[in-house]
Amino acid sequence: MKTTIYIEGGGNTAHLRSELRRGFKALFENAGFSGRLPKIVACGSRNEAFEDFETAFLAKSNDDAILLLVDSEDVVKKSKKWEHVKDRDGWEKHANMSENNIFLMVVAMESWFLADTDALEKFFGDGFDKKKLPQNQNREVIDKKILYDRLKKSTKNSSKGEYGKGKHSFKILSLLDVNKVKKHGRYAEEFFEHLNKIL
């Protein structure tokens, strides 16, 4: 089976899309998937990610696993992931698509960073203030605006300066302990458990 993951992010530059692929490749290697890595497609905007995923899904052979990985953007209140993105983004699920084709980073990729503050401390070095990060243990209900605000405040005086999405995000991703990320919440755990089954 060939597994391809269409991932939101990377903007419109080849450099950032390369950084995304490199970051997720390292993350999947950290998860123990070396030798059975999925193909990673950096798609830019979330709508572009859905469109690329949809095109590939409709053209796939029976042996292909085509997955979509996007930020939820908002706290998920629906029981089904497809219901969340239909309500929020207007995306329609095709008949053969299931809950195992779409996965959410809740509420954003940076939310996963909160599960491994040791990696953040290692990356940002001197001046990083862990105490300014959100302290809510249920990390999947932390609002996106609060998440980014606290990331910036906690890193403002660090050796690498204030957190910047394009500048830092994928480098941090490559340092994360996946066992900690799985404990971030049920959506993160579900994603890595499904990958482990199909890769």
Image: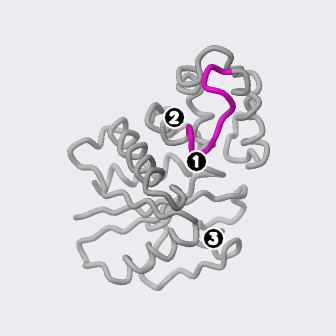
Q: Amino acid at mark 3?
A: Val
Q: Which residue is mark 1?
A: 109
Whichever of labels 3 and 2 marks the residue nearer the N terminus, that label is 3
Horizontal relation, residue 127 to residue 196: left or right:
right
Front one among 181 and 56: 56
Q: Amino acid at mark 2?
A: Ile
Real-space Cα separation, disc 1 to disc 2, in angstroms: 11 Å
Q: Nearer the viewer, mark 1 or mark 2?
A: 2
Residue 122: percent from left, percent from top: 53, 20
Front one among 110 and 36: 110
The magenta-colored residue range is 158-168
Say which element carries label 3: helix
Real-space Cα separation, disc 1 to disc 3, in angstroms: 16 Å
Label disc, if present, on residue 172 of the rendered structure: 2
Whichever of labels 1 and 3 marks the residue nearer the N terminus, that label is 3
Q: Are marks 1 and 3 in contact (CB under 8 Å)?
A: no
Say which element carries label 1: helix
Say which element carries label 2: helix
Q: Which residue is mark 3?
A: 85
